Amino acid sequence: MELSDLGSNLALGFSVALTFQNLFWCLVGAIVGTAIGVLPGVGPVATMALLLPVTYYLPAEGALIMLAGIYYGAQYGGSTTAILVNLPGESSSVITCLDGYAMARQGRPGPALAIAAIGSFFAGTVATVLIAVAAPPLTKLAQQFTPADYCSLMVLGLVTAVVMAHGSVIKAVGMVLLGLLLGIVGTDVQSGALRYTFGVDILFDGINFVPIAMGVFGLNEIMANLTNKERRDLLTSKVSGLMPTMADLKMSFGAMVRGTGLGSLLGILPGGGAVLASFAAYTLEKRISKTPEKFGTGMIQGVAAPESANNAAAQTSFIPMLTLGIPSNAVMAMMVGGMMIHGIIPGPQVMTDKPGLFWGMIASMWVGNLMLVVFNLPLVGIWVKMLTVPYRLLSIAILFFCCIGVYSLNNSADEVLLIALFGVVGYLFHKLDCEPAPMLLGFILGPMMETYLRRAMLLARGDSTVFVTSPLSLTFLVMSVLMLLLVVVPAVRKTREKAFQEE
Amino acid sequence: MSKGPGLRSGQDLLCGVMFAAVGAAALWVGRNYPMGTPVRLGSGVFPMLLSYGLIGVGAIIFFKGLLTDGPRLTGWAWRPVLLITLAAVCFALLIEPAGLVATMLVVMTLGALAGDDHKLRELAVFMLVMIAMAIGIFIWGLGMPIKVFPWN
């Protein structure tokens, strides 16, 4: 791409994003996003779904800029709850809980929050430039992926989820398989056959992501926390000294850069997005760290990397949606919904037919990120106050927000019954020491993976060797195997050492 | 859970049984889903692969629990589990017939019973604030089509 194209594209984008009206909608989106990100149990998908009818009354640019703002705003807010309450406001902040919450427990929630915000802004800035530079060529690359490549790519994503899981690798594999199975509940897109619906009509369209996520994270957290005095008391930990030290910044910088790079890359790939990016970035940091055993005990890199990665991915995940018309996650599906309301069909023609909208949205993301840093760091005090409510009261609020959040999605009382079910299931997992995060990832990727598996087999005329003869697919599979070996081998060694010691 | 020979980790044993049972159930429920051909995979292939995977993983975890030491099962905290679940069920059953305020009173009371150390006055104030906030956000702000009171 010519440099002058880049300049004129961005100039066009900013001329759209910086109009008074669009600045206003950007701000509204960013603040609403942060608020719902902070409020546990109310996610961006539910909020965007609620606001879709509202966007009908806005111009197309304003509507999409606001919806986008909710998404990346929620990334900022989600990390706040992850760090302070150990409750990810967003599934992409799940991993931030590990070290962010550990830092809060050590009395350093301020630096953790600041690093999360700074990392997010850094990632947002880089990702904006990156989209502008790379959108056209990267689109061409993604278009060359065959179904077999996609399928193997998803295997790699799931293996990543297994590798990053705390504790037992084999249990994480089980959770991924369970998630994949849950994901295919409902009507088979290809044949129209009903699978695992047991004649229950709310299952015909498949299980919604939100009730599962709220059940295993929201309700289960309350159940577990209410029985665990130690974790409950930590909520009252005082936030003092917001600014990170120079040492903190120095330690996080590399993690931010790596997180941004990895996040930007994973965000572009369908099925990836912010969740996968934050997991992958954390895994990477842990792998290259000289002190991997310290992760989970309050390493600042463990906050900087996933928070940079999820924000970078949140932004670059717009690329497949905008250019190929493929929503890579539930949030992007909402964006597609928002475009359809305004009669815009997502696809390659958006960039050429509506350059103002395309580049305006991209520019607005940088503007929105700037707003978030400027407003959020000072406002952290308010979020913190919101969250210093004692847990005995907070748990009641979370309970209610989970219920009404799920209800508001489809005005379906039956889906609230689903969160009750998944709350208990989540508690069982908690008791069995099975992490729910890999299951959620499997759940998201399940239907897509099956579709690509079938397409790959169809194109290869039933020859399953296609997965190893396509170079890209082979690369992804080899990477998956290598990652598994990396974790399994030391585990094997440790178990054996332990066994030897006992003898 | 006694730690005799052959029963090293109750947690792993139960976990293995859970995965294997889900896999077996999925295999049985999906036994008639069409398999199709290698070129046109039927709707039964992917579920079958996952089911066998789950059974295999379950078996590995189960035998790991038999052969190696691991964490034991700990008791369930029945009070919060039952009360929180009941609260969500009540929300589902009440929200449409009884409206927002009555539903919130029931759900929040059950939620409060799940925890302890509640001060009555603090709880009452908190519930009033929550109800006011919920009406503001969900009824006025977002215009959700739910009744405020049962008689609306």
Image: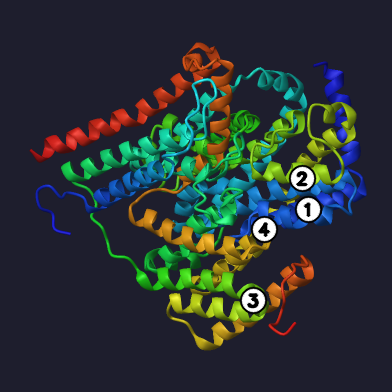
Chain letter of mark 4 equals A
**For the residue marked with disc 2, what is the amino acid?**
Gly
- Pinpoint residue A50: horizontal percent, then vertical percent: 74, 58
Q: Name the foreground residue: A34 vs A434.
A: A434
Callout 1–callout 2 Cβ contact below 8 Å? yes
Measured Cα–Cα span from mark 3 to mark 1: 25 Å
**For the residue marked with disc 1, what is the amino acid?**
Leu
Q: Which residue is mark 1?
A: A52
Measured Cα–Cα span from mark 1 to mark 4: 11 Å
Measured Cα–Cα span from mark 2 to mark 4: 14 Å
Q: Name the foreground residue: B70 vs B37.
A: B37
Q: Which residue is mark 3?
A: B130
In the visual, does A114 lie left or right of A27?
A: left
Same chain check for tags 3 and 1: no
Which residue sits at x=23%, y=55%?
A: B72
| Mark 2 or mark 4, earlier in chain | 2
Rendered position, B107 above or below A140: below
Q: Which residue is mark 2?
A: A337
| Kind of element beneath mark 1 | helix
How many residues crowd around disc 1 within 10 Å: few (fewer than 14), some, or many (20 or more)? some
Q: Which residue is mark 4?
A: A409
Q: Name the foreground residue: A462 vs B59.
A: A462
Which mark, residue A172?
A: none
**For the residue marked with disc 3, what is the amino acid?**
Met
Rendered position, B15 above or below A305: below
